[in-house]
Every structure is written in structure tokens, then in C-alpha cells.
Amino acid sequence: MLCLHDSMSLAEGLLLAVLGFITAVWGYKLARLWASLLSGIALGYVFYQYSSYELQALLTPLVLFIIGFIAGAMIGFAIFKLAISLVAGFAVAQSLISAGLFKANEISLIVLTILFAMILYAVVDKLLALVFVIGGAALLFIGLLLTPLPMIVTIILVFLAVVLGLYKNLKK
């Protein structure tokens, strides 16, 4: 049996607990924020690096980067749900085809990907929120196991974090 006390310190446990709480309560919103920031940085870089000389003469490269960053961040925030749905739909379709449940060709892969993406698009917000709440609660639980708290207190704190995370992420 793995004993966490042998490999981790109290400070590491507390850090894990704090990160778990943050993930459980704000994980989905932070994921959307990161997707927006990364999309903004990527498009800002493209605007900065690949703009014409005439445009670079008119606007400085920094201004081009900022314009691209703002546009990319808005695009990333807007298509986050669609992108997650498409990737998950592809993964489900590929898994079903690999299992031999459907004929292995490009048409079936495309049709199944679109079909599953449409289904997942309707529930992806709730599924991702649930994934972040469960993952954050697990991190919180493991982190609190490294503290001298009694097990009942640890379980109550994890339960409260789950309830708070579900409330904050699933209310509309």
C-alpha cells in the first residue's frame, strides 16, 4: 500500500490541497481563460511575425501583436466549447471504429465525429465542470491526507468543496 506520508511533506500536501480546491471550484473557468490566452498569444504571434512590410510600417509590430492577441483571445473563448466537442467526438468515433463497431474509412469517421460532436456540444459544459470538480476534489483529498486532520474532517472538507464546485460551475 502506498503511504503518502513517506514521499510528501506537509507543505506539499497543503499546496496540493489548495490547488485541488482551486481546480474544483474554478477549474472550468480557468481552462476557458487559458484557452483564450493561448489562442490570443498564437494569433498575436502570427500577426506580429507574418504581417506585410507595409502593414508593419503603418503599425508597429507590438500594435499588430496586440490586435492579434485580442482577436485570438475572443476567438479562443468563443470556440472553446466547439473545439472540445470536436476533439471528444473524434476520440469517441475513433474508439468505436477501432473496436470494430463501424467500418473503418474516412466517411464513417467524419460522420461519427460530427454526430458525437453535436451530442457532446449540448453537454460539454456540464461534463467538463464535473471533470474539474472530481479532479479537484481528488487533489484536495490527497493533499488533506498529508495533514494531521482527522479523516472525518477531511471528508467533510472535500464534500463541501464538491458541493461548492458543482454549485459554482453548474448554475446558469
Image (cartoon, rainbow, N blue to C red):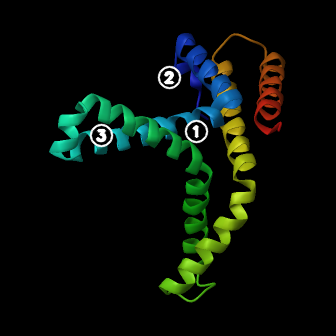
* Residue 72 shown left or right of residue 152 in the figure: left
Q: Which mark is residue 108?
A: none
Residue placed under numbered mark 2 in the picture: 7
Q: CA distance from mark 2 to mark 1?
A: 33 Å
**Residue, disc 3:** 45
Instruction: Give percent across and percent down for residue 46.
Output: 29, 45
Determine whether 72 is above or below 136 in the image. below
| Residue 142 shows in the view | no
Taking 145 as reference, is 64 above or below it? below
**How many other residues sit within 10 Å of disc 2, few (<14), some (14-19) or many (≥20)?**
few
The quadrant in which the N terminus is found is: top right
The answer to which image quadrant residue 77 occupies is top right
Residue 154 at x, y = what percent? 77, 20
> The residue tagged with tag 1: helix, strand or loop?
helix
Write the residue at 19% across / 47% down.
52
Q: Which residue is mark 1?
A: 32
- In this rendering, the label closer to the viewer, 2 or 1: 1
Q: Position of residue 88 (x, y in %)?
A: 59, 61
